[in-house]
Image (cartoon, helix red, strand yellow):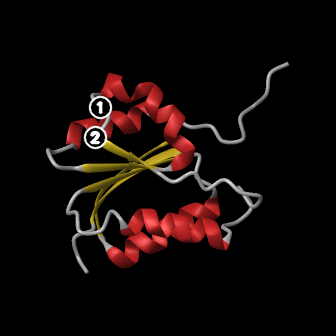
Amino acid sequence: MLIEPKWRSEIKPVLSFIKSDRQPGDILYVYQRGIYQFLYYAERYGFREGDYILGVDDLDKYDGRGVSELERKRYLNDLNNLRGNSRVWLLFSHAAPSENELFQSYLAENGVRLAEFHSKGTSAYLYDLSYD
């Protein structure tokens, strides 16, 4: 019996894009749903431990059905820790719509988008979060 995944994603083209545009000092934040997928390919694309930050594990009883207040606080804490940096990559894979909306809203209010790249179920955004 084969089980179809809830969300399909293609992370390799996105990692290639990040790798080609990455500069020394860039920070890469990996959204928690894409961590295992990212870690599987990380070394192949030149990412070593210390090159990236793994997002908080937010899974709770509301997972995929909205963002609970606890999830919201944990995500915002992650994002606030990235502020002050002029080149922050954010890698999203398997993001639920409500979680994506929260991240996009925060980023639009607190940073400047410098680049983006999308592949099936996976996206990368480069932001300048150095503004206060």
Name the residue at 44% across, 62% down.
78
Other-residue count near label 1 (Cα within 10 Å), few / some / many at <14 / 14–19 / ≥20: few
Name the residue at 22% across, 37% down.
20
Secondary structure of the residue carrying numbered label 1: loop
Mark 1 to mark 2 CA distance (whole Å): 5 Å
- Quarter-of-image position of residue 58: bottom right
Q: Position of residue 43 (x, y in %)?
A: 34, 25
Count of numbered badges drawn on the protein: 2
* Residue for badge 1: 48
Residue contact at pointers 1 and 2, CB within 8 angstroms: yes
Secondary structure of the residue carrying numbered label 2: loop
Residue farthest to the left, as pictured? 24
Q: Position of residue 74 (x, y in %)?
A: 53, 65
Quadrant occupied by the C terminus: bottom left
- Quarter-of-image position of residue 1: top right
- 41 w.r.t. 100: above or below: above
State whether residue 10 appears in this view: no
* Residue for badge 2: 51
Name the residue at 23% across, 76% down.
131
Name the residue at 72% across, 41% down.
6
Q: Position of residue 86 (x, y in %)?
A: 20, 63
